[in-house]
Image (tube, rainbow, N blue to C red):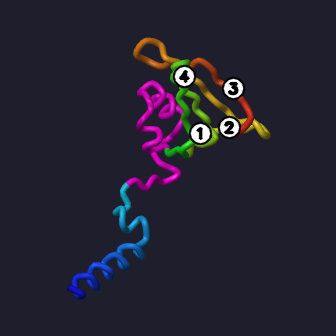
Amino acid sequence: MWIRTFLLGLSLTVCATLPADARSGGVGHDDPLNAEHIGVLPSDIRQYIAGICKGPARAQHDFATYLPSEKRWRINLEYLHCEGLGAFRRGNQCLDVDFVGDGSHFRLARKGYAECGF
């Protein structure tokens, strides 16, 4: 009986000392710059991004925000990383674009400079 208790205690000790990502198998790890942050957006917005980027694009978590009450996507271009993006910053202001729902599509509703970040 004491052998079972000892083995149980040993296995619990080993499991408790493993790093958290080893125990989870690494599932759920989300790189701060990730193409999936763009891939989950509506196709109209993905097409807009493809038009301003030359090649693959990646974005940070705060890149896109959806406001369901307004059916509006706010895209903060300072969190977009791609070749060919061009100028998106003027001093302390960054280029933001808004898309609003129009039936089953989203259309560009606003494009302008605002304070960088939220």
Three-letter residue code for mark 4: Arg
- For the point 51% across and 19% down, the residue is 71
Three-letter residue code for mark 1: Leu
Q: Earlier in the sequence, mark 2 or mark 4?
A: 4
Q: Which residue is mark 4?
A: 72
Q: Judge whether residue 39 can be spotted in this image.
A: yes
Q: Which residue is mark 3?
A: 112
Q: Which residue is mark 1?
A: 85
Label 4, secondary structure: give it. Answer: strand
Label 3, secondary structure: give it. Answer: strand
- Residue 13 percent coordinates (x, y): 37, 78
- Residue 6 percent coordinates (x, y): 28, 85
Q: Earlier in the sequence, mark 3 or mark 1?
A: 1
Give the quadrant of the N terminus: bottom left
Label 3 to label 1: alpha-carbon separation: 15 Å
Mark 2 or 1: the one toward you: 2
Q: Which residue is mark 2?
A: 118
- For the point 46% across and 38% down, the residue is 38
Label 4 to label 3: alpha-carbon separation: 15 Å
Q: Quadrant of residue 105?
A: top left
Q: Quadrant of residue 64?
A: top right
